[in-house]
Image (cartoon, helix red, strand yellow):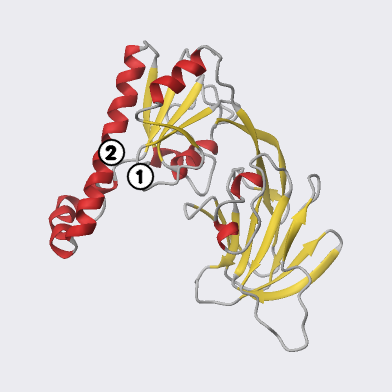
Amino acid sequence: MKLNHVIVVFKKPSMLHGTGGKSALPRLKRVSPDLFRRRLLMQKSHVKTIEQVQKILKELEIPHEVIERKKLESPSNPPSPPFLKGGAGKLQASLIITIGGDGTVLAASHVAGNIPILGVNSMPRTSVGFFCAANASTFKQKITEIKSNRLRFTSLPLLEVSIDGKRLPYLPLNDILFVASSPAETVQYMIQVGQQKERQRGSGVWIAAGPGSTAGICSAGGKVTTVTSRRIQYLARELYPIPGTVYRFRKGFIPPGKSIKITSEMSDGMAFLDGSKLMYPVPRGSTLAVRIAHQRLRIFL
């Protein structure tokens, strides 16, 4: 494919920012030397990968622009970072390269539209990098294969989320977690699968399609499916055993074209999309609805 312009999205090295500033490094070294060494190695690997990717892009004469990941993360409204041109939230680029882990891929996926993503795992020794097809040592091979059309992207299903009929501006790739604003609070809600409803009390509900089936929902007891599966999987977390109550909708699958609905019965219900950055209130009486989106994500795997 023609790489006329590439957007490089990177995660800022964690040890170089934060409330601790420069004092964070010596303090961590003093309190936990082992953790300090591991964090330092992770930071060095991340910085080295950022430098390596830019070096190779220059060698191959591929025009590129570098953007920090946090500029993509806007919970309230669709993102409008400086590299969005032409309106309609479309990136004017041939390819998006992410440097970091799966979190950076997820952040980029929310604004990618039809532009393919190549994830580069900058810390392969410690990061899962499920959505990352490359690392520092394999990046040149991967980008060359993409340029010569020897590597094709995969189309992955995305989730469409609405609250009281209003569509949210982001299409989650990984999962959705419906919980209370406090992790210590019991979550009360009505779940609707098809035409059937059930009142539940527990810790919340995981919702994912194929791409997110190996993430949080799997750890909670869900099933791993193919990454391209368009079936919606749901799993209720830690349901409270009310005497005389038999829960029918503990977990299951919903076919493409159908939706799952959750009506909040608490004042501080929350929906988290693809992690902790994108969160939306679902107050008492409001209904969260999830279905497979028409749009798909193009990504090299």
Q: Name the quadrant containing residue 58.
A: top left
Q: Earlier in the sequence, mark 1 or mark 2?
A: 2
Q: Name the quadrant containing residue 69.
A: top left
Q: Residue at x 79, y 71 (%)?
A: 248
Instruction: Please identify, in this view, whether the residue under mark 1 or under mark 2 is nearer the observer.
Output: 1
Provide the residue designation for mark 2.
45
| Left or right of residue 140: residue 114 | right
| Left or right of residue 191: residue 44 | left
| Left or right of residue 92: residue 28 | left
The amino acid pointed to by label 2 is Ser
Q: Secondary structure at mark 2?
A: helix
Location of residue 93 with respect to 251 vertically, above or below: above
The amino acid pointed to by label 1 is Arg
Disc tally is 2
Location of residue 6 with respect to 166 vertically, above or below: above
Image quadrant where one finds the C terminus: top right
Provide the residue designation for mark 1.
125
Q: Is residue 73 visible?
A: no
Q: Secondary structure at mark 1?
A: loop
Relative depth, front residue between 268 and 258: 258
Image quadrant where one finds the N terminus: top right
Q: Residue at x 40, y 13 (%)?
A: 62
Q: Position of residue 267 (x, y in %)?
A: 60, 72
Q: Position of residue 171 (x, y in %)?
A: 61, 43
Location of residue 258 with respect to 5 vertically, above or below: below
Q: Name the quadrant containing residue 139.
A: top left
Tell me, yes or no, whether the two marked residues, 1 and 2, touch with CB atoms within 8 Å: yes
Relative depth, front residue between 156 and 19: 156
Assess disc 2: are there few (<14), some (14-19) or many (≥20) residues with their C-alpha within 10 Å of its C-alpha. some
Relative depth, front residue between 152 and 114: 152
Q: Between marks 1 and 2, how big is the CA–CA gap?
A: 9 Å
